[in-house]
Amino acid sequence: MSEDAADIVYLVVVAIAGCTTTAKIVAWRRERSGALRLIATCSAVGVGAFLFATPVVYRAVGAATGSPNLAELLVFFCILGFFAHTHVMAMLWQPERMPPLAGISALAVRLSVYGLLGLLMLAGFLLSDTGDTPHPMDFNVAYGRDPGSLLMLAAFQSGLAYASLATAIRFRRSALLSAQRDPRLSRALHHISIATWFIAGYVVCVGPATLAGALGSHALDPLHSLGPVSGTIGAFVINYGFSGAAVAAWRADRRDYIALAPLWELTRQADPRMALDEPNRLTALGFFDVRDWHLLTRIADILTVVQSLGPYFDAAPADRIRRVAGAERWTEPEERAAAAAATLLDAVARKNAGVDPPAAPAALPGRDLSPAEERAHLVKVASRLRHPAVRAAAGVPVRS
């Protein structure tokens, strides 16, 4: 990979990982979760690794500090810090729980190992003779015969090999054990496991080339260039592992927010004053604050108006729906949603026309559902509002 190509690829990784870090920080400020804080700091350290590894930044750090290859040490520190975080996460998130004292002891041992490796890298760098020119892409082969550099490289690559393999195995085991209980978490852990195997590929490529260079041979230099490629692939995959579950949840929230729009508009016809939030053209797209505000307020607006429409609910629309449900081949939840949609359409039409409420108001179909089922039910109700059979049962015109 050339320096120009590395500048582009690494900065793209920095941008993606920066978005992941920002999202996790925002989520942590909202939920104050220890797991989110750990992911946020882990992702931030990963951003630092690719930022310092970017050749243009690498050279700028050298020019600013007078140490041409200082950025190499910073990259190694960031990568080691990143894997210290992932190793801790892998140990904390395992489905089979260790006894508290054993878990604390195991964590202390691992963190001590990472601390020792960091000290060895620092000592190696201080003892090295790397003060001539920057080598952002070929530091390993350029200084493989320097004793100090070799100490730093040996400490880093041995630590990276241990960390990536241990993390990959732990996350893979956790993904398998959590598959039944939490499929979304299992997929995220599986992706992180795959990513760490790619990062381990960095050692597979760079390690032999570094050793060969230390022995005076450059026959494996082409293998060295594959290391950053493997590590970069791992970075893309691990960012997906960190963010995939959150993105999937956001997409589901946005989908439901938009799907509920017809039902929200219907309830506004009954009482516009009940709206907690008036979406503008941007918020109506559902890209921002969906989970924290817009979806919640949309559901709250709908339920508030539905409650106020109680006296206008008539049993006739739901009875008509039941008579046509067989012909429409609706499932029980779909029939319930269609009956609720017809009842609401009829109630809003009655209220707006000034018609007296029925003498014996009926219960709205689906009102006995649990809170966990209510959101999905409302989405189904919204999707049935334009159905010809539903509008016919409610006695309102069919829209094209």
Image (cartoon, rainbow, N blue to C red):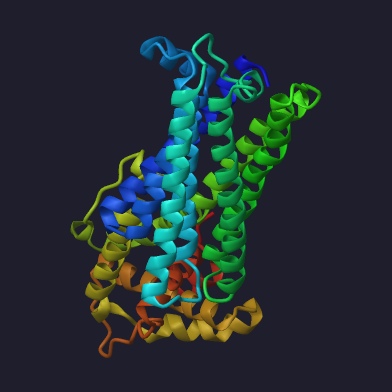
Q: Is residue 52 visible?
A: no
Give the residue displayed 46% in from the left and 51% down from the top.
Answer: 113
Image spot of residue 33 (x, y percent): 31, 59
Position of 362 relative to 18 (above/below): below
Image spot of residue 336 (x, y percent): 48, 80
Q: Is residue 171 left or right of residue 104?
A: right
Position of 286 relative to 127 (above/below): below
* Front residue of 330 and 131: 131
Position of 242 relative to 78 (above/below): below
Give the residue displayed 52% in from the left and 79% down from the top.
Answer: 333
The quarter of the displayed image where residue 280 is located: top left
The residue at the far bottom in this view is 360
Q: Is residue 320 visible?
A: yes
Image spot of residue 104 (x, y percent): 37, 67
Q: Quadrant of the C terminus?
A: bottom right
* Count of numbered circles in the view: 0
* Front residue of 182 and 92: 92
The residue at the far right in this view is 219
Position of 126 relative to 92 (above/below): above
The quarter of the displayed image where residue 122 is located: top left
* Front residue of 165 and 154: 154
Q: Quadrant of the N terminus?
A: top right
Give the residue displayed 45% in from the left and 48% down from the top.
Answer: 114
Image spot of residue 57 (x, y percent): 46, 18
The quarter of the displayed image where residue 221 is located: top right
The residue at the far left in this view is 273
Q: Is residue 196 left or right of residue 343?
A: right
